[in-house]
Amino acid sequence: MSAVTASTTTTRTGLREGELRHRLYPIVMHAIMLTAVLLVTFPLIYAIILSTQSGALGSLRPGPALLDNVQRAWDSAKMGLLMRNTLIVALAVAIGKIILSLLGAFALIYFRVRFGGLIMALVMLTHLLPLPVRIVPTYELLTEFGWVDTFWGLTIPFFASATGLLLFQQFFRTVPTDLADAARVDGAGPFRFLVSILIPVSRTNIGALFLIEFVYMWNQYLWPLLVANSDSTRQVQIGIKQLVASDAVIEWGVVMAGSMMVIIPPLVVLLTLQRSLMTGLTGATEDL
Amino acid sequence: MNIVFPNRILPYLLLAPSILLVLIFFLYPAVQSVDLSLYLVNRVRDVKVYVGMENFQRLFESDAYLNSLQVTGLFTLTVVVSALVISLALAVGASQPIRGFGVYRTLLIWTYALSPAIAGVIWALLTDPAIGVLTEVLESFGIAFNWRRSNTDALLFVAMAATWKILGYDILFFLAGLKNIPRDVLEAAAIDGAGAWLRFRRMVLPLLRPTILFLVIMNTLYASFETFGLIDITTQGGPGRATDLLIYRLYLDGFRSSSRIGLASAQSIVLLLMVATLTIIQYRFISRRTFYQ
């Protein structure tokens, strides 16, 4: 109440000041945010500039050597092949995790499962056991399976997903039960219901999970360092390490050209699917 | 409840792959870790001797390990605090209801796509003694920054690169958290005369509490585990042992030495206890929210 009276009794000059502040506010905020974005992005911009230079390095003017640097990164670390290898791993794990967690959540929500709580607790255990906690025995297991230096070794140990199972379980609970009832009355079996109703309404969550897992796998470092040592399985992050370590003096132009190449796929996935992730995070179910 | 389909065996078949994967690649190796931590193992000589708690005793008497504990603590604290403060400020700024601000939201989350290793390479470039632009800027202020020689600079360097990389992730979650705060509540407070700072302190911050706690835990896990690539590609734990994080020590003992498998497994168990503590805090305070890697 007092605030309202205060604003109505402001003097003429006071009102003008308020108006001025009101008009200036967006402009000042734009200036602040623009500076912030530039600061956060500057290291990347500098890296991009460097990837175009050779010889006289370090100036802020782009040079003419981008294609040459890309070519050299491509040749010396076989970046093309490594990008293919990493794409196989990232896609396989992202899709595999989505399928396994969709099936698991479907089973737990739409069927009568004895020991469902116990099974859930078992899967949730994966949160307690990140790779470093079991790294030596997991590597030894891989040796026993003969999976060192294979795509099996790079992907299968990552397939179980508590994140995905929880995500889809929570989402399925919000799907109206009449949808499933109607499907059953229509004589649709469980798989018909899953494929033609449940998966389509889950597409936002599927997109969010795909984004998270694709980026996570594309950026893997420790496991590929241990497991993938030949050209046919080596992953991009290790390729960058080879570019850095290949010469006594770091060839910054080549290293940056390689790094910029490696950033592109996860960046494209992020830009394409960020809306899904945002919707998934804010818990909205606006697709229904 | 949602239960609609009468099939009795089908649900178990659907769950079987997940259960098997957890048993084979999570539970079994974890139990093995506990087992190995009680043995003295030498891969080259093919020896395995039961030594009980001796590995743990050796661990906590070893200067290298105690150093790693200290370095990891300092590094994690620096990264978590600076990442949360910077990203909260940027997210609050970017979520202002001003025309054209949607662009900033996209332009601020992109480091999410970056790997710690590449973040390390980019910051190594910025701080290169010969051509680094940041080196030049610092020199003009009379600061000689060299992470290859100075221990403090090295820790600062990896902390800066690690913080920069995680900003995108944190901003993403803060933006989502801020979006869940009803606008009209804040507007009502503004009409009642509450200034921007008061609204932030008394309304926004308390409402963001679950997001903040979630991010503290995720950033702690990130700083202690996911930064391995950043360390390996730049400092490799050096100079001396200035950036020898626990995860890097584990790698050196477990895979770059043939006689320290038991010691490495003991380190795994210590990490397990740390993760368990964090997970319990997570469940205790923020119900059953999903982890996003």
Image: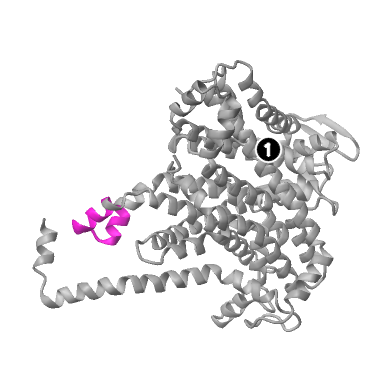
Q: Residue at x 81, y 63 (%)?
A: A77
Secondary structure of residue under mark 1: loop
Amino acid marked by disc 1: Phe
Q: Position of residue A286 (x, y in %)?
A: 42, 43
Residue A99 falls in which quadrant of the image? top right
Q: Residue at x 73, y 38 (%)?
A: A156
Q: Position of residue B270 (x, y in %)?
A: 64, 38
Q: Is residue B127 visible to us here? A: no
Local crowd size for mark 1, using a 10 Å CA cut-off: few (<14), some (14–19), many (≥20)? many
The part of the chain drawn in magenta is B185-202
Is B115 covered by the magenta stretch? no
Return the chain for callout 1: A
Is B197 covered by the magenta stretch? yes
Q: Residue at x 46, y 65 (%)?
A: B103
Q: Quadrant of the N terminus of chain B?
A: top left
Residue A71 falls in which quadrant of the image? bottom right
Q: In the shown orientation, is residue B254 left or right of residue B193?
A: right
Q: Is residue A116 above or below residue B173?
A: above
Residue annotated with mark 1: A159
